[in-house]
Image (cartoon, rainbow, N blue to C red):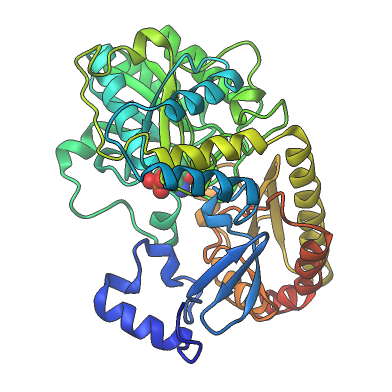
């Protein structure tokens, strides 16, 4: 336990001396909202508590995994039992099969599964697999979609890359960048043109099932079905990145945004966050004939010392087993309450905005009411300067929002009416702070 006398500022000063920016993942440094990051020391239910003893209602949810809330008793119990059995075996073991079964039973098209440790590793592996299976090199991604930090996928990426206003990343070679074609999201014509010119070289189109890393940007009606059709027509694979949406967006059942597809499935999926229940697990899944290109059945290499780690598998299994339709209904309902209170508070303060929402995932964009946000260009054109004051007013009132306007807000099964009320009560003053920015 941290010394209660230690302040967030002291912790940040020490951290900055030891770690670039004082963090292990850029957005945590509060760069775009300013101020000193709160150093959290514990999490329970809908709450986080920092080193100074301040308790916050958490709307980050560990960036997605905490679907059931923090420290859900059944998840903790499963993790304790797994720890008691040993931290890792470096061998096959029964609970990785159990998690794979849970994924397959809920995701049409996820015929086989390979566990990895992070979402980045999942998308990187899916891309290599698509290239290996098709014998083609090019990958098409959409501006503002974030697929982790592997070299070829950092072009025009959302999330922290958007927060920091970077075009991509130093250290990515031109050769790698040249094999990624970036298209504006929701732009069918641009994609038609790419395929008309280079269709025979495209290994895969990768897309977030519902983008949520440039704020939440719902796919235009029929857009995902169009991606299925055009990839199939040109012999390319379609990769649905469900690291964020998988087992969280639930409108048509509880298997992620792909539950919203009508009668078709992508070739490959990537999952992360919720399937690890808060521990480092992610996965590639998809068509059997494609997945069997992975070693040892095929020539596409992937391996991992910690892939399928038993403690992480236990957290994932317990989380999915308790992710019932009642849980999703509760989260959807609470998200609706928070999103509409947010809209009312901003309207009352005269702040132009739009709130974009798919299932329980939603985000806020200032100054965009005329057009909404349908792509990355629109997301970047918003009045980002209003978010810092808004964020800090919420923090002051004990609500921990994502420290970037480009990130979605995450509710959980543990957000009861009391926690939601605390959020709702904090909104009017935060809206005033945004208005005054
Ligand atoms: N894909 C998507 C859609 C994501 O949202 C993220 C992370 N936010 C990733 C991939 C990368 O996952 P990780 O941070 O676990 O590497």
In the picture, the quarter occupied by the C terminus is bottom right
Residue 393 in the image: above or below residue 232: below
> 48 or 284, which lies in front?
48
Residue 152 vertical position relative to residue 97 in the rendered view, above or below: below
Query: Residue 161 appears in which quarter of the rendering?
Result: bottom left
- Residue 47: quarter of image: bottom right
Q: Position of residue 207 (x, y in %)?
A: 46, 31
Instruction: Work out whether residue 95 can be spotted.
Output: yes
Position of 401 with respect to 91 (left or right) is right
Tell me the residue at 43%/12% (across/down): 287
Q: Quadrant of ligand 1?
A: top left
Q: Is residue 156 visible?
A: no
Q: 112 or 241: nearer the eye? A: 112
Q: Is residue 63 above or below residue 194?
A: below
Give coordinates of residue 342: x percent, y percent: 76, 62
Which of these two is toward me, 296 or 169? 296
């Amino acid at each position: 336990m941290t010394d209660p006398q230690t302040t967030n500022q002291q912790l940040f000063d020490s951290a900055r001396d030891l770690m670039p920016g004082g963090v292990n993942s850029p957005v945590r440094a509060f760069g775009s909202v300013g101020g000193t990051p709160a150093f959290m020391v514990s999490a329970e239910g809908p709450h986080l508590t920092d080193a100074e003893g301040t308790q916050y209602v958490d709307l980050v949810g560990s960036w997605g995994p905490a679907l059931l809330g923090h420290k859900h008793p059944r998840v903790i119990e499963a993790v304790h039992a797994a720890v008691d059995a040993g931290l890792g075996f470096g061998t096959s073991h029964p609970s990785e099969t159990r998690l794979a079964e849970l994924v397959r039973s809920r995701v049409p098209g996820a015929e086989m599964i390979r566990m990895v440790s992070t979402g980045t590793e999942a998308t990187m592996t899916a891309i290599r697999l698509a290239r290996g299976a098709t014998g083609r090199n090019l990958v098409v991604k959409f501006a503002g979609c974030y697929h982790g930090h592997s070299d070829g996928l950092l072009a025009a990426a959302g999330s922290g890359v958007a927060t920091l206003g970077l075009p991509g990343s130093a250290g990515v070679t031109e050769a790698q960048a040249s094999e990624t074609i970036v298209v504006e999201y929701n732009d069918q014509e641009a994609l038609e043109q790419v395929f008309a010119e280079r269709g025979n070289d495209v290994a895969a189109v990768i897309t977030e099932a519902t983008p949520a890393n440039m704020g939440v940007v719902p796919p235009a009606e029929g857009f995902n079905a169009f991606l299925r059709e055009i990839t199939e027509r040109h012999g390319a694979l379609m990769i649905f990145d469900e690291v964020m949406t998988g087992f969280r967006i639930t409108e048509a059942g509880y298997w992620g945004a792909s539950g919203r597809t009508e009668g078709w499935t992508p070739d490959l999926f990537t999952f992360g966050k919720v399937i690890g229940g808060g521990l480092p697990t992610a996965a590639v899944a998809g068509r059997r004939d494609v997945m069997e290109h992975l070693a040892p059945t095929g020539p596409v290499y992937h391996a991992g010392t910690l892939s399928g780690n038993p403690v992480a598998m236990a957290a994932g299994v317990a989380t999915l087993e308790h992710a019932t339709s009642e849980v999703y209904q509760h989260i959807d309902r609470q998200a609706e309450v928070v999103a509409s209170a947010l809209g009312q508070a901003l309207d009352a303060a005269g702040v132009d905005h739009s709130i974009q929402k798919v299932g329980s995932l939603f985000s806020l964009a200032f100054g965009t009411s005329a057009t909404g946000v349908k792509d990355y260009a629109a997301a970047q054109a918003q009045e980002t300067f209003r978010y810092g004051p808004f964020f800090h007013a919420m923090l002051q009132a004990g609500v921990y929002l994502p420290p970037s306007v480009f990130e979605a807000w995450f509710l959980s099964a543990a957000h009861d009416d009391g926690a939601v009320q605390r959020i709702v009560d904090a909104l009017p003053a935060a809206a005033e702070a945004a208005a005054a920015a």
